[in-house]
Image (tube, coloured by chain):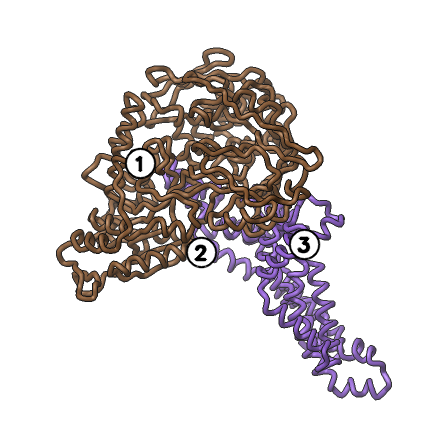
Amino acid sequence: MGMKWYVVRRVVWAVVATYLAVSLTFGLLMVTPNAGADVAAAQAAASGQDYDAVRERYLERRGLDRPVEEQYVDYMTNIVTLDWGYSFSQGEPVLGAIGEAWVYSAQYFVPAILISALLGYGIGLYSALNRYTPTDYLGSFVAYFGISIPNFWFAIVLILLFGVVFRLLPTFYDSGVALLSVQNAKQLLMPVVVLSTASVAGQMRYSRAQAIEYARSAFVKTARAKGASEWRVLTRHILRVALVPLSTILIADVLAVLFAGSFIIETIFQIPGLGRLALEAIQQRDTPLVLATTLIPVFIAILGNLLQDLAYVALDPRIDYGDR
Amino acid sequence: MAEDRGLASLRRRRLLKSLAAAGFSVSVAGCSGDGSDTEDEGDPEYELGPGDQSYIAGSTSAAQSISPAVISDEATSNRLDLLYDSGGTIDDEDISFEGRLLSEWELSDDARTARYRVRDGLEWGAGYGQLTAEDYVYCATNFFLADWAQYSQRPSFAPGGEPIEYVQTGELTFEARLPERRPNWLHEDILYGVPILPKGLIQKYEPGNGSEGDLQGLNRDEAITSGELNGNLGPFNLVSWEKGQRMVLSANDDYYLADADVGGGEYEGSPSIDSYTYQVFDERTTGYSALKAGDITSIGVEARKKSELSSATGVETWSSKFGSGVFWLNLNFRANGWSQLRSREVRQALAHLLDKNTLIEQIKNGNASPIDTFHPRWGPYYDDAKITTFESSVERARQKLASGTSSDYGYDGQDRLIGPDGEQVELTVVIENTSQEGEIVGNFLRQRLESAGIAVSVEGNSFDRLLQNYLFNSVDNNPNYSGDPEFNVGRYNGGPPDQAVSREQWDILSGVGFSASPYAPWTPIEFTLTPQGPFNFNGYRTDEYDIQGAINEAPNAESQEATQEIMTDLFGFLSRDQPYVWAFSEHQIAAYREGVEGLPEVENFFDGPSARLLSLSTAQAGTPTPLANESSGSGSSNSS
């Protein structure tokens, strides 16, 4: 009962948090000058039409001339009924635009997250158990390299090296290539490498630190005293407990990639994914699309945090939400 | 084609482009210049780029629509140009009309009637039948000139404010009855420069039976979104369009121009390319890398990158000095600008300080031409004898600042220009700082003004902020004025200079250019330099010269010579008066894989690459198909 009640309360809180985040975004957009209207009106004025009339017509056509509270209620109702509106910058319904874009993002995003988690935790744990050896130093170098190097610079250098100098990989993402093809895998290679490099670094450093901390703990010593192998100690005793804080880092990394990484990666490699969609929506003040692309990371953050809390219980039996 | 060629800074030129799209420039396709530079022999295995007969054009801007009914930007216009031919273009040989959908264009002797003949054998797709004069007349009257269509170039169909009357005179002939004399109509006639719509399609969506007209419905009509409407009217058919990403086209085997006797057979068998793709690059650097790697065939190039790309293996550059975009330093004549800018001598002093050649070298690597007035030096209305130039000289500038400012200004013992408050004069220079060019200009101006004893504060802004904080002006921003302005023609000119001011104070502003529209320059002049011009955000005005009168008279003067006289006089005055400090005219530059054939020799504004004439040499096929260069040599009757 206690655990179920906790989950129910967390879900309710997730709804409240989503509501607050969407409301805040809506408020910020309302106070932002509408550049689209200004540009449209400027063009109209340049061709001899009445500036203010065109501007008003622009706003009217998009329903932006109505009272703010009316727009707010409408938008919230549409969110709940999954009618996320029409994106004028894309010329199609918002959900349609997102439906087309997410496939492109997922193609590099999912492999990058998996690779960074596996490599990051793997190298981190290995380094923790082999401290001050050449391989530990190599792992640390990889970590610091990944943290220090800016994504955009790394991406451009990779394109120059592997695309221009060696001509091994395509220089940009060709959206006409079949999803399941070698050519597609080749063109996703550089985006995945760039994205995972930064994430690997962070996860490796955290997992190394966590593993070192637990490697000295009493329960690990007890396991060793009972004759457990190093592999069993590592995977069953150290990793399991270390995963509690590490799962927190993983969620943070996913969000960092979604918010910042995808803008850069997709812009440089010309991938028509969610990052570019969001960027264009912001640049063109496409309110429905901005709100929708804001909602996605918000949902992921809220859902991720919920799953993460539940995962704590499975990973560490000492944690119990029954009384909370 | 490489429609981005010569765009040194997309942001900086956004205004310029939007205005050009609104009807300022005669032709975005026209450019010409100093020929191509091939500096590298290239590896034959990949000199083509993407492959035999497949052409991929890189572009930093995306089409906003694929509807001929909505063309408000250059990128959209260039893409639609491959799907739908327009009525005609300008023959680059003798600057006369060269036919496309229209086989004849003729202006009556009294310059009041333009007569057109539609080419025989033109077919719409999607079941709309033959294209006839009825389509042209209906489209012009019931769409371009109709309120419901909100057509962006509508004013061009109403010279002097009066709409043109279009009348069908035969199945394939019609005429335009102009409300006033327009001897220069060849360069002003918008009808032959834009794609049209079939009468049947317009009728489906136009107002009637109580409806107000459904423009959105028209733009989303299956015939338009599928591209099937083009029939045999364009060189390519639409294969797919991913907005913001790419547009893929395939050669139209039925293209009428392939068999038409136009340009002395120049277009026979065109297009030569089987597949044409526009690939968008948000990051220009990636586009350059793609060209160097041979993943794309061509891309427009920033001036400062020209030499780097010229020296890349397998790449050649093409450039034209006949760019129509001109740049200058804006001066704030409004109440929140430095009052001394209203003195001509002070403005001339600033012209002496602006060393144009050094500036061009620093920000364009020499790929721009200095200008002295609101007209490029190669322009048809440029007369050396009437133009005043100002050599680069700090000494001359100091002399003019000393004599041109009011009596309470003067230089102190440390060569500083001191104002009425006893302090050194400090000017606010505003730049667009999202590009390296903006920063260089800011530093350059600081250095030059300081050498003349003027302190400088440089304010950097994004283009959007530049518009909102400095170009927009209103009486609401002026604490010293209450009440309504004498006039208000929009955000860029919210009233007289002593009433409407910008939100932020400024004195000199760099980063906004304009199309000089060299063959019909009266429109940009009216918009930027007349007291009630909708883009006169500087607040410029003069009692010495009747600018409005000159530009009213020039387009419908008695003869070309009379127009020439009026405009050269006006440009002479503008060089002398320096309402802006004139800076430079950009060159157009593009880079291609070496396998691209058919780039024109550049001799005038109208020489530019055309997708209809380009071909790709192939390693397998050996020599490319030679291209005929003879022109029709059509005379003044302008038929082809």
Q: What chain is tagged by disc 1?
A: B
Residue A275 versus residue B638 in the image, above or below: below
User: What residue occupies the far right of the structure in this picture?
Assistant: A227
Q: Is residue B481 visible?
A: no
- Which chain is depicted purple? A
Q: Nearer the viewer, mark 3 or mark 2?
A: 3
- The reply to whether label 1 and label 2 mark residues of one chain is yes
Is the residue under label 3 in contact with that under label 1 (CB below 8 Å)? no
Q: Nearer the viewer, residue A274 or A319?
A: A274
Q: Which of the two discs, 1 and 2, labels the residue nearer the N terminus?
A: 2
Q: Which mark is residue A166?
A: 3
- From the image, state the color of chain B: brown
Furthest residue in direction top, as rendered: B170
Graded by Cα atoms within 10 Å as few (under 14), some (14 to 19) or many (20 or more), the crowding at tag 3 reads few
> Residue at (76%, 79%) from the top-left corner?
A238
Q: Where's residue A45, x and y in %?
A: 37, 38
Furthest toward the left, the residue is: B407
Mark 3 vs mark 2, CA separation in Å = 30 Å
For label 3, the SS is loop
Q: Which residue is mark 1?
A: B526
Query: In the rendered image, which residue does mark 2 sit on?
Result: B436
Residues at marks 3 and 2 on the same chain: no
User: What's under tag 2, amino acid-wise?
Assistant: Gln
Residue B474, how many percent across, how many down? 30, 49
